[in-house]
Image (spheres, rainbow, N blue to C red):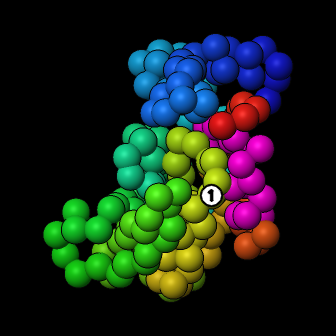
């Protein structure tokens, strides 16, 4: 990605200090999503490495991963699979528990969403500590998925989430990085 695009994408992301608590800078991609050019360029950059290849499904993590994942799946002519919080999917599901900063949560996927050996790209807006993305990776692999890559608009490398995914053998692609939390 060229430096100008990197600068433009970073500028399209709103930074909100001390949200949701003091010392945290929240990276808000809704401003990027609302900017048609920045949104299109982000999706194009995330799609580019997979264009012309076979990607069976794009799996998006609730909620912003749905927005990005749907757009990416459309560009790749792939199916889209939502990974949701417990209790939100109407059919039979497979579930995994994962740790949060202050407790435990669960995410799930429909039992028939992924076929054995299907090539899947995992998508979310941001990777921080990696807890959610690692759990989603484990859930997809439990379903028999071959995870081609995990894609994010934002990486917070100081929190180590991308490294955790790479340690699991997952290729990680992100468009911009921000230091700190």
Stretch in magenta = 152-166
Our reading of the magenta stretch's main secondary structure is: helix
The image quadrant where one finds the N terminus is top right
Quadrant assignment, res 158: top right
Q: Is residue 156 magenta?
A: yes
Disc 1 is placed on an element classified as loop
Residue occupying the far front of the picture? 22
Q: Is residue 19 left or right of residue 157?
A: left
Residue 47 visible in the snapshot:
no
Q: Residues within 10 Å of mark 1 (few under 14, many from 20)?
A: some
**What residue is disc 1 on?**
130
Q: Which of 32 and 16 is in front in this view?
A: 16
Residue 19 x/y as whole percent: 48, 28
> Residue at 83% across / 19% down in the picture?
3
For the point 42% across and 18% down, which residue is it? 34
Q: In this view, does 94 lie above or below 62?
A: below
């Amino acid at each position: 990605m060229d430096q100008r695009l990197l600068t433009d994408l970073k500028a399209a992301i709103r930074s909100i200090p001390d949200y949701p608590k003091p010392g945290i800078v929240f990276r808000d991609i809704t401003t990027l999503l609302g900017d048609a050019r920045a949104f299109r360029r982000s999706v194009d950059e995330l799609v580019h490495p997979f264009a012309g290849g076979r990607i069976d499904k794009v799996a998006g993590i609730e909620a912003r991963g749905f927005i990005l994942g749907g757009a990416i799946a459309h560009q790749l002519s792939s199916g889209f699979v939502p990974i949701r919080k417990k209790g939100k999917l109407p059919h039979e599901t497979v579930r995994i528990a994962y740790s949060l900063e202050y407790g435990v949560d669960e995410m799930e996927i429909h039992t028939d969403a992924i076929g054995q050996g299907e090539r899947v790209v995992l998508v979310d807006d941001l990777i921080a500590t990696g807890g959610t993305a690692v759990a989603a990776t484990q859930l997809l692999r439990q379903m028999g998925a071959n995870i081609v890559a995990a894609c994010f608009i934002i990486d917070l490398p100081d929190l180590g989430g991308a490294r955790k995914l790479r340690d699991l053998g997952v290729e990680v692609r992100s468009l911009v990085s921000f230091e700190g939390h």
